[in-house]
Amino acid sequence: MSQATLHIQKISGHAGAVPGAGMARELKEKQVCKLVDTTTCIGCKACEIACQEWNDLPFATTSFDNTYQTMPDTSWNFWNLIRFQEHTNENGTFMWLMRKDQCMHCAEPGCLEACPADGAIVQYSNGIVDFQTDNCIGCGYCISGCPFNIPKFNPATHKVHKCTLCADRVAENLEPACIKACPTGCLHFGTKEDMVYQANRRADQLKKHYGWANAGVYDPPGVGGTGVIYVLHDATNPELYGGLPKDPHVPWIVKLWKHPLKWIGNIAIVGGVVGTFMHYLRYGPKVVPEDTAKGGE
Amino acid sequence: MEENRILRNHRVLRYTFKERVVHWISGLSYVYLLLTGLAFWSPWCFWIAVVLGGGSVSRLLHPWMGLVYTASVLYMFGIWKQDMWITDKDRKWAKTIGAYVRNEEEEKLPEHAVREWQEWAPVERFNLGQKYLFWVMFWGGIVLLLTGLVLWFTDYIPWSLRFLRYASIILHPIAFLVTLAGFIIHVYMGTAVVRGGFTSIIRGEVTETWARHHHRLWLDRILGNATARK
């Protein structure tokens, strides 16, 4: 995606003003969101294939680990993975939990916060967090900044990749490829407002008509809300769904590094340089007195 | 044991060729690490990476240069550690550090103070400040190496060991800032303040007067060695 095609509200490693910040009209309405209803996912993996197809990624060899899991993890060329769990409920009934795992498109993206390369990660005014591969320097800081373990490193090119929420399709008013492929209607795409409304309606339905007392919506506030939200049977225990973190935050240590330490460090560096210069102005050099008797310099 | 450091015309050999070479391998690699590191440190310095061949090239070479730097520091540790242990004489010198910083050397002090200063202040091959610099660069280098390895191979650190990444992401810049403090003072002292110091690390030689003024105990020792050899 060219930075010119969409408004940009955040840029990684960027000195000075952000071109698109505050420029989009009716910003709130334009936030896009993917809704994943884990209660209606059948694990068909059509979304995985659609993602590979649209993004021209190679089809990876599947592996068999005696479960319904076909791949162990996402990778630099596999951005969308159904995470499969077998779960026994307290009443002894048995469940297959399926969760579509991909970039969450956080409102406060830890990857973007940690990235030192100018323009390597951008957040469009519609909320999509996108890697600009040309600007990526391959440092891997985004991997440490992400609370969801999403960015993946390509050792051959030294670039990091992840789901783009099909920013290229969305810019043309198309839904992301995964949404298009879903046969059960468990995936929805629209404005954040609409998707939150729909997700809450579904959670209410699960509570009232299906007896899932803990059903709820996963839209973690610790990262400012996400551009991908889940409906879960048991929203009090998101870890069940392939390790979805309960209360994700940008790691505090990344914030400590990028804010207080940076300012303390900058003041110390400038102070050191100015201080030595002041010392020279005040005290000057140490000149060894001539020792003519010894034939010194 | 120690090689002859007495040269003709009242000059002494302050740094051997080997010492000078390793100093400059260390110094120049540090400068490269500093420049590329500053580029990753702040967006306002990212232009440095652009000048040095781009962000990707800087990211690629920074860790290799880090290995060069740590190797040179470890080598220095090997050849200089005997001269770098902090002794009681240094602790005495530390009490006169205010006078040293203000350039209140013997000729500028009243006579009774001269004697006192001379009693306290004689310095071996390196003064306490130089020793602190060495240990800052040595321990800073170790921390930078260990955390740098984690940051170099971030991709290979599994999710379950991510605390290593978090520790490295904060300790690497902290160690950088500490070494930079040492580096700024070192470069300032070595070029602007201590006249003759920069020449000594380039050509290796100083005058006996210079050595007597800055490192009297060291001069006495090597003169003694030279006498003993004769």
Image: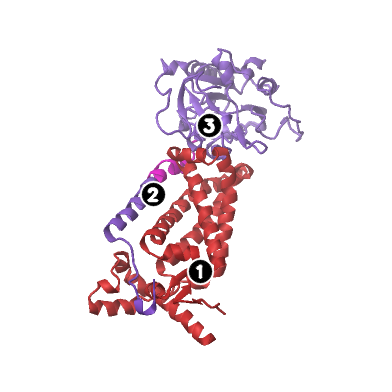
Chain colours: A purple, B red
What is the three-letter code of the residue carrying label 2? Ile
Q: Earlier in the sequence, mark 3 or mark 2?
A: 3
Provide residue B228's location: percent of width, then percent of height: 51, 87
Asked if the residue at tag 2 contacts the one at tag 3, i.e. Cβ–Cβ closer than 8 Å, the answer is no
Q: In front: B218, or A198?
A: B218
Q: Is residue B77 above or below residue A78?
A: below
Whole-number angstrom distance, CA of label 3 to CA of label 2: 27 Å
Which circle marks residue B15 in the picture? 1
State the residue at coordinates (41%, 65%).
B196
Provide residue A23's location: percent of width, then percent of height: 40, 19
Location of the N terminus of chain A (image quadrant)? top right
Q: In front: B106, or B155?
A: B106
What are the residue bounds of the magenta stretch?
Answer: A246-265
**Which is closer to the viewer, label 1 or label 2?**
1
Q: Is residue B92 above or below residue B133?
A: below
Q: Is residue B75 left or right of residue B88?
A: right
Provide residue A44's location: percent of width, then percent of height: 71, 21
User: Which residue bears the numbered disc 2?
Assistant: A269
What is the three-letter code of the residue carrying label 3? Ala
Q: How many residues crowd mark 1 within 10 Å: few (<14), some (14–19), many (20+)?
A: some
**Is residue A250 within the magenta segment?**
yes
Q: Quadrant of residue B145?
A: bottom right
Location of the C terminus of chain A (image quadrant)? bottom left
Q: Quadrant of residue A162?
A: top right
Whole-number angstrom distance, CA of label 1 to CA of label 2: 30 Å
Provide residue A198's location: percent of width, then percent of height: 52, 16
User: Which residue bears the numbered disc 3?
Assistant: A120
Secondary structure under the numbered disc 1 in the rendered image: loop
Q: In front: A260, or B148?
A: B148
Secondary structure under the numbered disc 3 in the rendered image: loop
**Total numbered circles:** 3
